[in-house]
């Protein structure tokens, strides 16, 4: 059987190890520089896979997961909307169209599930062109507050 080199499918429990590596590598790199370990990244990925109830996708290279997108659905006053919780592609494989494949899948789901809006929060200021490519606009309403 020949396998398509690059494919997108739903995330499953057994993706934990591969996605933990992607997660740790992507968010330890610029501009995040977060101090993820294999153990903490595994916990985060497990939480994503288990809490997201099927709204998670992975991009695979020769069957091996190298990127992911997770979406959380919420009920709003005027219907359902979605929040992109986490998206990443392994840094070695970025800028080769894999993040776009994931977003195409998310947008298909948006249509199927009749979500009226998708929200994406990112600390990465360079990703404006990525979001704009898929029709996202900067929000004039949102402001993020934090307390440590
Ligand atoms: C965001 C991310 C998933 C995009 O995945 P990707 O596979 O690199 O994206 P693509 O190759 O499909 O990029 C499509 C377009 O988006 C834009 N883009 C993507 N990454 C970009 C970057 N780092 N800087 C500027 N533009 C970028 C470009 O216009 C690009 O097209 P081009 O390469 O032809 O110029 C990836 O950069 C990533 O994992 N980043 C680290 C984690 C992160 O910041 N996640 C998002 C917030 S949680």
Image: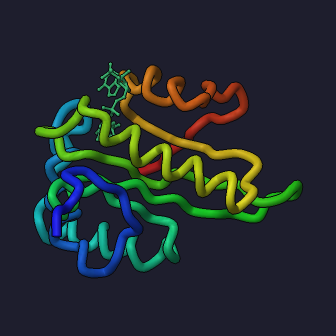
132 relative position to 43: left or right = right
Report the residue at 46% width, 22% height from top: 128
Relative to 138, 19 lies left or right: left
| x and y, in percent, of residue 113 in the image | 70, 62
Image vertical order of residue 25 relative to residue 54, above or below: above
Can you see residue 28?
Answer: yes
Q: Nearer the viewer, residue 119 or 112?
A: 112
In percent of width and height, residue 58 lies at 33, 60
- Identify the image quadrant of residue 15: bottom left
Q: Position of residue 64 (x, y in %)?
A: 16, 62
Quadrant assignment for the N terminus: bottom left
**Which residue ends up furthest to the right in the rendered image?**
78
Which residue occupies 23% across, 55% down? 4
Q: Give the vertical position of 18 relative to 81 (above or below).
A: below
For residue 27, say whether it is visible: no
- Taking the image as four quarters, which one is ligand 1 found in? top left
For the point 44% across and 64% down, which residue is it?
56
Q: Residue at x 21, y 71 (%)?
A: 42
The residue nearer to you, when weighing 130 against 43, is: 130
């Amino acid at each position: 059987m020949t396998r398509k080199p690059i494919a997108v499918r739903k995330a499953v429990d057994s993706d934990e190890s591969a996605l933990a590596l992607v997660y740790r590598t992507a968010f330890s790199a610029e501009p995040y520089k977060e101090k993820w370990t294999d153990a903490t990244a595994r916990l985060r990925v497990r939480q994503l896979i288990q809490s997201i109830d099927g709204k998670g996708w992975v991009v695979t290279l020769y069957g091996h997961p190298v990127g992911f997108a997770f979406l959380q659905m919420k009920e709003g006053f005027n219907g359902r909307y979605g929040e992109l919780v986490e998206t990443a592609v392994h840094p070695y494989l970025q800028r080769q169209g894999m993040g776009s494949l994931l977003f195409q899948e998310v947008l298909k789901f948006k249509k199927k599930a009749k979500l009226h809006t998708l929200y994406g929060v990112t600390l990465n200021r360079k990703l404006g062109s990525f979001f704009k490519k898929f029709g996202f606009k900067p929000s004039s309403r949102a402001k993020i507050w934090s307390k440590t």
